[in-house]
Amino acid sequence: MTPNFEPQIVGFLCNWCTYVAADLAGVARLVYPPNMRAIRMMCSGSVSPLYIISALKKGADGVFIGGCHIGDCHYQRGNHSTLKRVTIVKHLLEALGIDPRRLRLEWISASEGPKFSKVVAEFVNEIKELGPNPLKGI
């Protein structure tokens, strides 16, 4: 663990579920670390592997993807695509020598503000344990 290290996390959040949960957490004044920069996506299925790699390459210490629960996707199978892509990208990261724990996928519905708060806090702590992104500054 690096002292005084505050990770920068890029969060790709589904417009219909996880983004609404983040909003709910804010309205409910639930406390979670401010380390994540949220990007609203229409569906977690629209998160390209290139977005993930690009975020890490540009210095993000972690990438978070939040989508609707399996079976609840507003685009029917978007989250199925996300699950497949994230699995592949984690294998790619590992092959490149980057800890795959720097990428996290969670299913969080619109009503789960407390879960969003808890998961973001857990992920920030996990990234703190991993330390800064080894690609940072390259």
Image: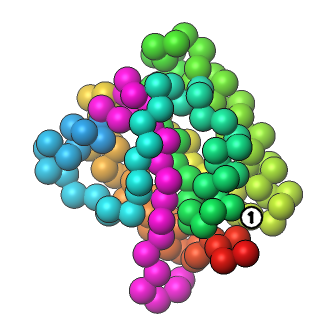
- Image quadrant in which the C terminus is located: bottom right
Q: Which contiguous range is marked in magenta?
A: 1-20
Q: Nearer the viewer, residue 74 or 40?
A: 40
Toward which corner of the image does residue 13 lie, by quadrant?
A: top left
- Number of callouts in the render? 1
Which residue in the rendered view is the most extreme toward the right?
Answer: 95
Taking the image as drawn, is residue 17 in sight? yes
Compared with residue 13, is residue 98 higher up or lower down, i.e. above or below? below
Instruction: Give the residue displayed 70% in from the left and 41% down from the top.
Output: 49
Where is residue 97? Give x, y as percent. 81, 66
Please report the residue visible at 60 percent of the width from the left and 15 percent of the height from the top. 77
Task: Where is residue 22? Give x, y as percent.
Answer: 30, 41
Left or right of 18, for residue 92: right
- Could one spot residue 101 in this view of the protein? no
Residue at 71 percent across and 30 percent down: it is 84
Structural crowding at the residue carrying mark 1, measured as other residues with C-alpha within 10 Å and reported as few (<14), some (14–19) or many (≥20):
some
Look at the picture and state if 1 lies above or below 84.
below
Residue drawn at point x = 47 percent, y = 25 percent = 42
Q: How is the image coloured?
A: rainbow
Q: Position of residue 131 (x, y in %)?
A: 57, 77
In which image quadrant can residue 100 be found?
Answer: bottom right
Give the x, y percent position of residue 118.
34, 52
For residue 17, side relative to residue 1 (left or right): left
Q: For mark 1, give the secondary structure.
A: loop
Pointer 1 residue:
98
In the image, taking residue 119 as reference, residue 52 lies left or right, namely: right
**Disc 1 residue type?**
Ile
